[in-house]
Image (cartoon, rainbow, N blue to C red):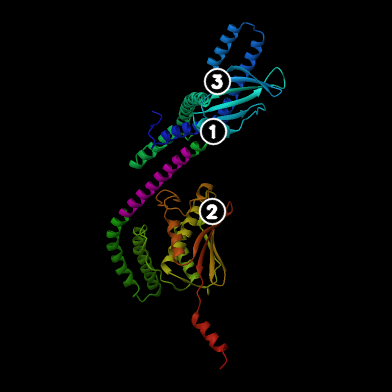
Amino acid sequence: MLGSLSPKRLSGKLLLMTIGFVMLAELVIFVPSAAIHRQNWLSERINQVDILNLALQGVEDFQASNELTQRVMNDTDIVMAAERHDGMSQLLLGAPPTDDQTIVVIDITKTRKIPKFIDFFKTFFGPSHGYYRVIGNASIPKDGNIEIIIPRENIKLDLRAYFKNIFFISLAIAIITGSLIYLTMALLIIRPIQSIAQNVASFQNAPETAPLDPIPSQRGDEIGDLQRAVADMKQSVRGSLKQRQRLATLGLAVAKINHDLRNVLTSAQLISDRLTTVEDPKVARMGDRLTRAIDRGVKLTRDVLNFSNPVNEPVKSEPMRISFLLGEVAGDVLPNFGTGPRRIKFMNDVPSDLQVAVDGDHSYRIFHNLMRNAAQAMAALTDDNAERLLRVYVDTGEDYVNIHVADTAGGLPDNAKDKLFRAFASGGGRGSTGLGLTIAKELAQAQGGDLRLERTSQSGTVFTVTLMRYQDNSKNKAKNSAATPA
């Protein structure tokens, strides 16, 4: 079916509006056409009397003349007809009405191409009793006139009959036109929209299993745009659902691991605590470093488990020499990637006295993720003689610092640039969750900074981490106190 004809449905409204508009157009056309019909009706009777007058002048038989005039009176409903010339009137047929009804004079000696509409309305809606005295031009003599008297009811009945004919013809045209427009619109618009609505409804009921549109619409109009937009929406929703499913699976897996991993890390933490009490300074430093690593591991599992939780742990902002943190991260990451000619060099160009106000654990995770990704990319280079350099450098502002992490891995692929910070979309390889850069950006923003891709090309990639610069308020207060006069 092309669509229901219920007035509440779009198809029914379309059909009714089409019929209504066609009837309205016919009504607008009817008024001037009816006014012209009225004028022609009166002119036709003047012409018939004029022809009768010419015929009577050539007929000498009174009986024949009487029959001819009687037939004209019966055919035209004329009560009286006369010829006027040089102020003299000659009765041609009939006789003046004897009753006292009103006689309205209509002069059509100067015929208008488009008569006055008001004359039509007066005739159509005016009273039926009374007569019209119509004055028209005669053929012979040229300066003569023909006058006829006809009942007002007769012309009014003729106009009503004309109205009925026009009405039914217009109604037929409206129905035919409306049906054709309805069928055309139903095929071009209503049926595709119904198909789209049913498609969306079935997808809404089962978004995970409902079939997708394998072939995009080839239509170039607005319906085609709508069909392609719906298909893109379904693809996007399906992708979002898959991401949510992966996130739920990841959360469940981390929840299971977290329970057992805590026990393992607790035991390891006890051992690392004992190592920090050993008198050997090197062993003590290794124990302290191991303790911090285990604490980060516990915190990492908890943060990944709460990744989708909108309630985040408060950020502990404290002054830190960021150069030392960067060196610590590089020492933890780079030894795991490449040795010998494939060894990755590290260059730390961040001043050792530069302090930032950050959360240590959050900042460690940010730079650990960036350096690990850079090291993985440089380790994947096949040329043993290729430069493998990881460099960190900084530019500073009054209230912020921009720390740049640059590698020489050859740049990112084009399809990865637009989805770097999208969860599950930027996974770098097998075993990757695609959460690293997403979490790193959120950690940077939680500290009042940001993480962004600065540039990428064949020479390498640069990520920029913006952090808040540490302001020593006590020194500022001391300077202000010294500058204030006693």
Most prominent secondary structure in the magenta stretch? helix
Q: Secondary structure at mark 2?
A: loop
Q: Label 1 amino acid? A: Lys
Residue 68: x percent and y percent? 58, 10
Instruction: Say which mark, if any, is on residue 79.
Output: 3
Residue holding disc 2: 409
Which quadrant of the structure image shows residue 86? top right
Residue holding disc 1: 122
Q: Label 3 amino acid? A: Val
In the depicted structure, whether residue 420 falls above or below residue 121 = below
In the depicted structure, whether residue 425 falls above or below residue 103 = below
Q: Secondary structure at mark 3?
A: loop
Does residue 229 show up magenta in the picture? yes
What quarter of the picture does the N terminus occupy? top left
Q: Nearer the viewer, residue 244 or 82?
A: 82
* Classed neighbour count for the residue bearing mark 2: other residues with Cα under 10 Å, few (<14), some (14–19), many (≥20): many
Q: Which residues are magenta?
A: 226-252
